């Protein structure tokens, strides 16, 4: 009887106090170590500072770096394809080629470093070359210049 009363008092006490913070469920450390820990803060994703450093060096930075490498590779590839077609088909200051031929060579229109507009024409720049796209007789053409 006495214990039951104590229990009830305890429950009531808890109810009268300001609500307890919701417990944070245990989570797996983001570094990839496989360790599950009890976070002290809601935004804690690593077990401790050492794991955070490891995670940063091996996950985040690596991903960032590999994305950058991929983009640079695509840009270099586009630039060398433009160079190849420019040198092979050059007439005065520019070369006009079938876009499909460049695409078949691996040219990817979604990789360029910037755009430039001149005389109402839009140019896309890569490292050393720029190009513009247009359609003539339903054929997609690319004009390449330096
Ligand atoms: Zn870890």
Image (cartoon, helix red, strand yellow):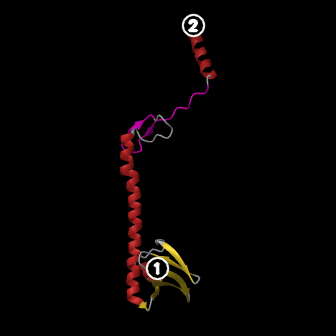
On the image, the x and y values in percent for residue 99 come to 47, 82
Q: Which residue is mark 2?
A: 2
Q: Is residue 23 magenta?
A: yes
Where disc 1 sits, the SS reads: strand
The region drawn magenta spans 18-38
The part of the image, by quadrant, that contains residue 71 is bottom left
Mark 2 surroundings: few (<14), some (14-19) or many (≥20) residues within 10 A: few
Which residue ends up furthest to the bottom in the rendered image? 91
89 versus 40 height, above or below: below
Where disc 2 sits, the SS reads: helix
51 versus 90 height, above or below: above
Name the quarter where the N terminus is drawn. top right
Residue 129 shows up from this direction: yes
Q: Which mark is residue 1?
A: none
On the image, the x and y values in percent for residue 7 come to 57, 14
69 versus 28 height, above or below: below
Marks 2 and 1, the one that precedes in the sequence:
2
From the viewer's side, name the closer residue of 2 and 78: 78
Q: From the viewer's perspective, is 25 left or right of 16?
A: left
Q: Residue at x 40, y 76 (%)?
A: 79
Q: Main secondary structure of the magenta part?
A: loop
The part of the image, by quadrant, that contains residue 135 is bottom right
Mark 1 surroundings: few (<14), some (14-19) or many (≥20) residues within 10 A: many
Disc 2 to disc 1, how far (Cα)?
88 Å
Q: Is the C-beta of the residue carrying label 1 under 8 Å from the nearest atom of ligand 1?
A: no
Residue 34 shows up from this direction: no
Name the quarter where the C terminus is drawn. bottom left
The part of the image, by quadrant, that contains residue 85 is bottom left
Which residue ends up furthest to the top in the rendered image? 2
Q: Residue at x 41, y 89 (%)?
A: 89
Q: Which mark is residue 130?
A: 1
Q: How many marks?
A: 2
């Amino acid at each position: 009887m006495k214990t039951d009363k104590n229990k009830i008092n305890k429950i009531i006490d808890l109810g009268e106090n300001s609500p307890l913070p919701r417990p944070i469920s245990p989570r797996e450390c983001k570094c990839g170590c496989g360790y599950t820990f009890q976070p002290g803060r809601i935004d804690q994703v690593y077990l401790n500072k050492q794991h955070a450093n490891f995670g940063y060096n091996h996950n985040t930075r690596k991903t960032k770096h590999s994305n950058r490498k991929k983009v640079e590779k695509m840009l270099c590839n586009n630039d060398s394809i433009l160079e190849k077609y420019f040198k092979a088909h050059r007439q005065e200051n520019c070369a006009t080629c079938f876009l499909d031929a460049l695409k078949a060579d691996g040219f990817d229109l979604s990789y360029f470093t910037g755009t430039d507009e001149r005389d109402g024409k839009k140019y896309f720049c890569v490292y050393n070359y720029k190009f513009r796209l247009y359609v003539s007789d339903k054929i997609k053409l690319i004009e390449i210049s330096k």
